[in-house]
Image: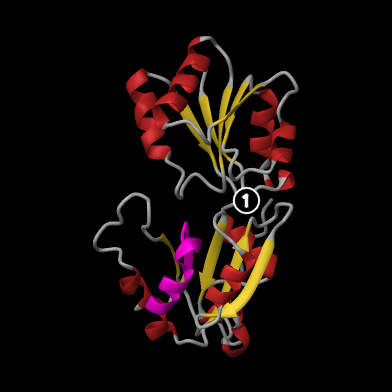
Amino acid sequence: MTVHFVGAGPGAADLLTVRAARLLAAADVVLYPGTYLDAEVLGHARPDAELIDTQHLDLDRITAHLVEAHSTGREVVRLASGDLSVYSALSEQTRRLDAAGVPWDVTPGVPAFAAAAALIGRELTVPLLAQSVVLTRTRARSTAMPESESLAAFAATRATLVLHLAIRRTRELMAELAGDYGPDCPVVVVYRASQPGQQVLHGTVATIADAVEAAGLRQAAVILVGRALDPSDGGESYLYDPARERRSRPTPG
């Protein structure tokens, strides 16, 4: 049997991919991150499936469940919040499965930053304002950041920043960004995008920390920073410029 790593998306039960829903419906065992996942997502699983909340388990205990399910011939899904390409511990888990000789595959999910951008109706790459998006995090009580990946280095690009796992350090981080982005730069904080209880806080580099502290947010939020969040001064895309030369492509079929 193959271990299926599945991106559960931002949390809403209807934002899973069709493939993710199909794998959940067929699974005998489902491991899920109870801290970040809306319980309705588990409604895609069979009523008789074994459900294991991983929020209090270390990676070795999680791996033990995956290996045991595989060895007994049961279909197993390992759910991760958002998409597995970012902050999912996929590499650590698959390294252990490879050592145990257990096959695995990956099904992508809707990342949290994409759900946050959709919720506020914003494109993160607006012509003349920002054409790059930096996904990063900061270090508090977590894994060390590589020395080359300082927030100051990313801020110097003035790209749209998406800060994960950073909500408890909002005030400190905004002070660090003020020099490059300016105190009036738009900032949006999205808490549990697409889930019941979702919250959206709008502000600037100078004001957003007050809003975050007043709301009492401590986890499960992303911070979006950049001029693209207020696109009124943005330009027009060359792709749709009427003066651009267009070449016809053969019609399929």
- Which of these two is toward me, 162 or 189? 189
Q: Is residue 187 magenta?
A: no
Q: Position of residue 82 (x, y in %)?
A: 57, 48
**Going by the image, does 135 lie left or right of 11?**
left
Q: Look at the magenta stretch and give its main secondary structure.
A: helix
Label 1 packing within 10 angstroms: few (<14), some (14-19), many (20+): many
- Disc 1 target residue: 10
The residue at the point 47 percent across, 56 percent down is 165
- Residue at the farthest bottom position: 233
Magenta stretch?
A: 162-176
Q: Quadrant of residue 28?
A: top right
Q: Position of residue 109 (x, y in %)?
A: 58, 46
Q: Position of residue 197 (x, y in %)?
A: 72, 56
**Going by the image, does 28 lie left or right of 87?**
right
Above/below status of 107 relative to 219? above
Q: Quadrant of residue 192?
A: bottom right
- Which of these two is toward me, 250 or 95? 95
The residue at the point 61 percent across, 79 percent down is 240
The residue at the point 70 percent across, 39 percent down is 39
- Residue at the farthest left position: 147
The residue at the point 57 percent across, 69 percent down is 213
Q: Position of residue 167 (x, y in %)?
A: 50, 62
Which three-letter amino acid code belongs to the residue tagged 1?
Pro
